[in-house]
Image (cartoon, grey):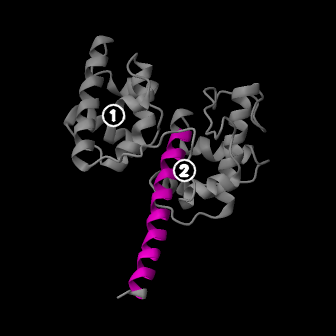
Amino acid sequence: MNDPSGQEQAKADAHRDRLTSGIKTFAALFSRLMDLNEFSHPTMVRLTASCMSGVSWLHSSQISGLRHAKLISPGPRTFVAIQQLNYYLHRYKTEKKLLPGTTSSNDYEKAFAITEDGEPPSVGWWVEVFCGIRIPKDIDLYSNKLSESQATNKSLGWAKSMRQLMMSNGIDIISDLDRVLRENYPPKDIDRLRKIKNVLMNGETWTPTEFELELPAITAFSAALGGPDAEREFFE
């Protein structure tokens, strides 16, 4: 015998699951946009406002919520601000035109942009990704999620390989670590810096979600020291 109420509940659960998945995907995209450009929170806020003629539609608290998949209902202005910054980063990367309102590229010299079919996507695209109704095509966002044990093993394995890499570069893990992180690890977030130092030196590990969100930054760190420069190498 059919259970209409049960079917409706299953449909409702599917909608919630899709949104949850989309929020996590968006967090991975947003983290990648920030980390590969080496943007701090203040830099992100300043550049989005600059790209919108001084209109401040993205704030530090929103940035934190988006990065950690905690902001579940951002307003349309948030998506517009991100889309505009991403568009102008792509323009700088392809045409070498400075971002609006800036006089140099010091804050965005690496100019990484999210693309779809090679082009910066529209505001609607960002909204659809957040809502879980679109899967980005140009970037592989880890369809095979990590388990807790896998995240633990990968954290420990990454830490060991980085310690070996630093030794081969003549870097002392104790006396030189703070300097090397300042020079080569993109985020300026105090909590994330504390966590990566504990991963490298004290056997601490990232959760599956933390590892996925941290992946762009730890890959950039590795590449800066002459190690693997592809995210997939660490994820697999």
**Residue 22 belongs to the span the image colors magenta:** yes
Q: Position of residue 44 (x, y in %)?
A: 61, 44
Q: Quadrant of residue 203?
A: top left
Label 1 belongs to which residue? 236
Label 2: which secondary element: loop
Res. 174 in view: no
Q: Give 221 or 209, whichever is nearer the viewer.
A: 209
Image height of 171 relative to 98, above or below: above
Q: Quadrant of the N terminus?
A: bottom left
Label 2 belongs to which residue? 135
Q: Is residue 40 left or right of residue 214?
A: right
Other-residue count near label 2 (Cα within 10 Å), few / some / many at <14 / 14–19 / ≥20: some
What number of labels is visible?
A: 2
**Residue 163 belongs to the span the image colors magenta:** no
Say which amino acid is labelled 2: Ile
Image height of 86 relative to 18, above or below: above
Residue that extends furthest to the front in the rendered view of this protein: 1
Q: Position of residue 5 (x, y in %)?
A: 41, 87
Q: Which residues are magenta?
A: 5-34
- Circle nearer the N terminus (1, 2): 2
